[in-house]
Amino acid sequence: MSPSKCATAKMIPISISLRGRRVTSAIYLREPDLSVFALMPFTIVGHPTGGSSVVFWVRSSCTTRALFMGVCVQGSAKSRRSATGLTRCNKGTIDPGSGGLGRVVLMFVDNVNDIFDKIHHICVVGSGPVGLVTALELASLGQAVTLLESGLLGPDANIQALSEAFLVDPQRNRDMALAVQRSFGGTSNLWGAGCVPLDPVDFARRPITADAAWPLSYEEFAAHLKTACQYANCGTSFEEPVTGIGTADDRFSAHTLIRYAQPPSFGKAYRSTIAKSPLITACLGASVTGLCFAEGGGLAGVEVRSAGGGSGVLRARIFVLACGGVETTRLLLAAQAESPARFGGEGGPLGRYYMGHLSGDIADIRLNHAGLDKGFDFFRAPDGAYGRRRLTASGAFQTKENLTNISFWPKLPAMSDPSHRDPILSLAYLALSFPPLGRALMSESLRRINVGEGTDRLAHMLNVLRGIPAITRFLPAFVHRRMLSKRRLPGLHMCNGARRYPLHYHAEHLPNANSRVYLSKDRDALGLRKVALDLRFSSADAQAVVRTHQHLGDWLKGTGLGELIWHDTPAQTEAKVLEFAGDGVHQIGTARMAASAREGVVDRNCRVFGCDNLFLAGSAVFPTSGQANPTLSAIALAVRLARQIAVEAATHTA
C-alpha cells in the first residue's frame, strides 16, 4: 500500500490481547475489498511507530511468505471486530523462528498479489471433509497445496447466501441453508457424523441401475477406506454380529454397522493441523466464481472473488474441485455456458442423474429376541468408536431379486407427537424446540427434522411432569455420554417392553437423467448464476422400497426374529414412499464417473474428460448412490485421488 493510499485509508482502533499482554493501537484497514483470508501462524517481533499510526511487524512460519505489517485477530469481548486488514511490507525476508508473544490462526491478506502473482502447485477448492482430506493427504505426500474456502471459520449470512438455489419442488429438495454450509469444515458442521462405506454390490453392473456403472472395482475403492476411516476417526470395522443370533437364511443380516466420526466437524478436527502445515496455505473468504481455460484445453486458473469485491485469477498446475455436489456442478455448468461443447455438451451427463436417498417409515418392526432388540442401540465397539447396527439385504439377494440397496433400523416414535407419552422424548422435544439450546445440541438441519411442525407444548410438559422419576434416572448418564465424554454418544435410542418400533429405511435412489441441476437466470451477489435443483423420484424407486420391505418381512417371519407390521395397504404404501421422498443433503451423481465422456464427466481417476489438470472430488462423481451416506466413501475416493495426483504431479506444468 503506497503512502498516499495509506493517508486516505480508514483508521480503525483495535485492542489485541496476546498471552495476557494487551496492546491498543490503530492500524490501517483498506476499504472492503479484502480478497482472501489465510491461515498462517505468526509471531510479533516489534511494533515500530510510523507517522500517526502504529504497525506491528509480523514474521510468518510459512517459509514462502514475505514479511507483513499489521495484525489481525478474531474479535474478543472487548473488540467485536472479527478482523482487521494487513498491509504487505515489500522489504525483509522470512525469519521462521519460534517463540514470540503469540499465535493466531486467521488473518486477512490485504494484497491480492500475494496469491495471484504466483503459480501455485495444487489448488483445492472447498474445505469440507473431502477438500480437507484431499489437502492433508497431498501434504502428507510432500505436495504443496493452496486450499480455497468461500466461507470463514464460522457461519456468515452473506457468504452463506451465495449457495441459495431455486428449488423446483421444495418438498423434494432441502433448503440449501440447511443442506450445506460455507465455512471452514463445510457441511461437516451440519451433519450427524454417520460414516458408512459403499457396498461391493454398488460397484457391480446391475439391471436396476441401467447404464450407470462404476469404472473401477470395489477392491480399488476399498484399498483407501482404512485411511478414510482414520481421517474421520470413526473406527474401521463395519460388521459386528449380535451375540446369540444365528440363522442359516442369509438373505438379510443385522450385523452391518454405521460408525460415527469424532469430532463431527472436520474443521475443528483439522484446523490446527492445517494452520501448522508448512505445505498447506488455506485461504478463507475466497469464493471461486469461474474457471479459466487455456487454449490447449487445460485449466489455467480459477477466478476468485471476495464478498467485498476483491478479485483475481489464481493460477496453478493442478486443480481439484471439492466444493460439494451442487457447487462443483454449478462451476462446471457456468464454464459450459461459455463454451457449450465442454463436458459432453448441453445434452450430456453434466448436471444430470441428480440423486440422494429415499427415507421414511412405512411399517413397524416387532422384535422377538431380546438380544437383537438391545443390539440395535448405540454401542462402543472394541476400536473405541460408536456404532449402530442396521438390517441390510445381501448383495447376492439384491442382484437375484433386482432390488435397490436399502438399509433399515428401528427408530423412536416421532418426538414431536406428545401422544407417545414418553417423558424423555418430550423433554428432548422441548429442549430442541428452543432454538438456542437446540442448536447447541445438534445441527440446525437435524434439529428441524426432529422438531417438525409446531405442536402442543403443554402436552409435552405434562409428559415431563408425569415422568420426573424416569427422567432423573436417565438424564445424568445420558448427559455425561452425550455432552461430557471425549467420545460422545451420537444419538438417542431407547428400548421398550413391546419391542415394537417404527422401521426407518434409507434407500438407494436410482439414476434418472431428468433429475437435474441446471443454471437459472438469477445471479448471486458475486455475479455467478444460481442453480435450479430439480430432484425427482420415480415409481421404480418406490416399488423397490416396497418389495424389499416385503422380502424383509418374510425373512423376519421365517427366522422367527420378528415381524413387520405395515402402516397402510400395499396400494397406499407405494404412494406413501413417494410422498416421503426428498433429500438435497446427499448431492450425488451430477458429474459422474464413467468409462467415456459420452457417459460421464470424469474418468476412473476423477479427472475431467478433456482437461488433464482438473479433477473432481466428492459425491458428485458417484454413478450410483447405494444405501450409504456418501461422505466416508467420498473421503476414500479423495485419498485415492490425492495419491494419484502425487504420483503424476511432477508431469504437470503451468
Image (cartoon, rainbow, N blue to C red):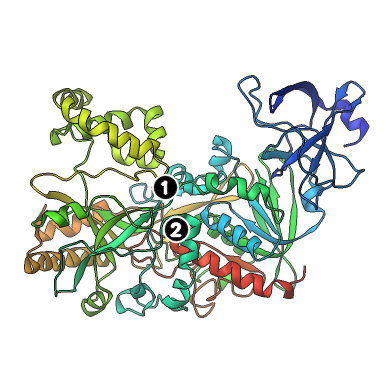
Q: Earlier in the sequence, mark 2 or mark 1?
A: 1
Q: Is residue 326 above or below residue 456?
A: below
Q: Is residue 127 above or below residue 292?
A: above
Element under disc 1: loop
The residue carrying pointer 1 sits among few (fewer than 14), some (14 to 19) or many (20 or more) residues within 10 Å by Cα, namely many
Query: Measured from the top left, where is residue 408 in percent x and y?
Result: 23, 59
Q: CA distance from mark 2 to mark 1?
A: 10 Å
Q: Is residue 156 above or below residue 228?
A: above
Query: Measured from the top left, where is residue 329 in percent x and y?
Result: 53, 60
Q: Which residue is under mark 1?
A: 191
Q: What is the number of the mark on residue 631? A: 2
Does 515 sit left or right of 408 as displayed? right
Query: Measured from the top left, where is residue 403 in percent x and y?
Result: 24, 72
**Mark 2 vs 1: CB contact within 8 A:** yes
Q: Quadrant of the C terminus?
A: bottom right
Location of residue 28 (image quadrant): top right
Front in this rendered view, residue 169 or 645: 645
Q: Quadrant of the N terminus?
A: top right
User: What residue lies at 11% left-to-right and 52% top-to-bottom?
Assistant: 567
Does 482 sit left or right of 314 as displayed? left
User: What residue lies at 62% left-to-right and 55% top-to-bottom?
Assistant: 125
- Identified by mark 1, the residue type is Trp
